[in-house]
Image (spheres, grey):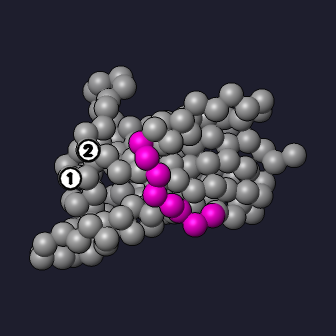
């Protein structure tokens, strides 16, 4: 059995969630380290078989685009609805990734909470012994989405 890297699982899971739940085309950006423009971010913790952190940052224009696709609204965007959607998106991406990366393992998730971009960027910079960290970047309609995680097998 071939072991799949955390980065590969995170990329595949994120692309699938975006396509399935938001009808969004997600492409890997050409720039090696793209930067966010006017981003909002969210973080959650996981415990159980895998312990760690997931965080998501998304440019506001891209969040508006996902919100319109998810809610089907033609009316004016609602900042509150969009931030709630960011929390739900973070939950979906973490759940999908953990289901594929640690199948048949129990990994409960905390409630997602909004954070700043600096905290999101720190997620994948962990130097914990035994931890695996990665960040993926995806171009979607309206801007950039990045997903970071740092996980380690629970002791």
Residue 40 visible in the current orientation: yes
Which residue occupies 73% across, 41% down? 152
Residue at 56% across / 49% down in the picture? 54
Q: Would you say 50 lies left or right of 69 here?
A: right
Residues under labels 2 and 1: Cα distance? 8 Å
Q: Secondary structure at mark 2?
A: loop
> Which is nearer the eye, 64 or 100?
64
The residue that disc 2 covers is 38
Q: Quick check: 149 above or below 25?
A: above
Q: Name the residue nearer the viewer: 84 or 130.
A: 84
Dot 1 alpha-carbon crowd within 10 angstroms: few under 14, some 14 to 19, many 20 or more: some
- Per the image, is 128 magenta? no
User: Is the residue under label 1 in contact with that under label 2 (CB below 8 Å)?
Assistant: yes
Q: Residue at x 29, y 42 (%)?
A: 144
Lower sequence index among marks 2 and 1: 2
Q: Which quadrant of the view contains residue 117?
A: top left
Residue found farthest to the top: 32
In this view, 63 is above or below 74: above
Q: Is residue 7 visible?
A: no
**Residue density around tag 2, few if under 14, some if 14–19, many if 20 or more, within 10 Å:** few
Residue, far left: 75
Left or right: 98, with 77 as reference point? right
Which quadrant does the N terminus fall into?
top right
- Percent x, y for residue 91? 51, 62
Stretch in magenta: 110-117
Question: How far across and how far down the image is residue 60, in percent?
Answer: 25, 52
Helix, strand or loop under label 1: helix
Residue 66: x and y in percent read 27, 61
Q: Which residue is mark 1?
A: 61
Nearer to us of marks 2 and 1 is 2
The residue shown at (45%, 63%) is 87
């Amino acid at each position: 059995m071939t072991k799949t890297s955390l980065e590969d699982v995170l990329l595949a899971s994120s692309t699938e969630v975006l396509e399935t739940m938001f009808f969004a085309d997600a492409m890997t950006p050409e720039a090696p380290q793209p930067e966010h423009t006017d981003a909002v971010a969210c973080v959650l913790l996981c415990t159980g078989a895998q312990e760690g952190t997931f965080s998501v940052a998304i440019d506001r224009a891209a969040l508006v685009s996902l919100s319109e696709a998810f809610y089907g609204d033609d009316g004016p965007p609602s900042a509150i609805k969009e931030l709630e959607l960011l929390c739900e998106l973070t939950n979906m991406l973490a759940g999908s990734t953990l289901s594929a990366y640690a199948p048949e393992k129990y990994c409960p998730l905390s409630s997602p909470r909004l954070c700043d971009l600096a905290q999101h960027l720190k997620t994948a910079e962990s130097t914990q012994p035994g931890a695996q960290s990665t960040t993926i970047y995806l171009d979607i309609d309206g801007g950039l989405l990045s997903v970071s995680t740092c996980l380690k097998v629970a002791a």
